[in-house]
Image (cartoon, rainbow, N blue to C red):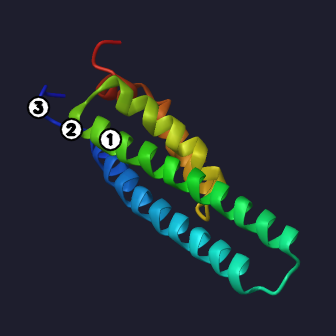
Amino acid sequence: MTPGSRPTAVTVFAWINLGLAVQMVMLAVLFAAASTFGALFSGDPLGDRVGGGIMGALIAMFFLAAAGVHGAACAGLLKRRRWGFYAHVVGALMEICSCWGTTYTVVAIIFALQDDFRQWALPDG
């Protein structure tokens, strides 16, 4: 492998992480909108509306955090930085809580544990 070449799996996972970051932002907006609508217009007792609003906000914040991790993973993998590899692994583990679920997590972790993926993504070790 020449120093300037990029293995396909690393580049593909970098762009998948960007797509997942966009997906996580959309899920955060969806949960924020649903919890706001439920809190304002559901007709439930006040305690239930407040609890639902808080829960929706917490879920939306989790998805925004996941979007940040996926964005960092994309940038780090494309720039060949050590933190990009670790952000990719953390993002894959956070993906269990989304609609992609364990399918993406299993595939991403399997690729991350392969020697050629780690050698390229972690140039100094």
| Quarter of the picture holding the C terminus | top left
Residue at 59 percent across and 59 percent down: it is 60
Counting from the top left corner in percent of width and height, residue 46 is at 84, 73
Q: Mark 2 = which residue?
A: 6
Q: CA distance from mark 1 to mark 2?
A: 7 Å
Local crowd size for mark 3, using a 10 Å CA cut-off: few (<14), some (14–19), many (≥20)? few
Residue type at mark 2: give it: Arg
Counting from the top left corner in percent of width and height, residue 35 is at 67, 72
Dividing the picture into quadrants, the one containing residue 9 is: top left
Residue type at mark 1: give it: Val
Q: Mark 3 = which residue?
A: 4
Residue 117 visible in the shown view = no
Q: Mark 1 = which residue?
A: 10
Residue at 25 percent across and 30 percent down: it is 80
| Quarter of the picture holding the N terminus | top left
Q: Secondary structure at mark 2?
A: loop
Left or right, 37 with respect to 82, comes to right
Dividing the picture into quadrants, the one containing residue 81 is: top left
Q: Nearer the viewer, residue 69 or 32?
A: 32
Counting from the top left corner in percent of width and height, residue 86 is at 45, 29
Q: CA distance from mark 3 to mark 1?
A: 13 Å
Q: Residue furthest top?
A: 125
Q: Secondary structure at mark 1?
A: helix
Mark 1 and mark 2 in contact? Answer it, CB < 8 Å: yes
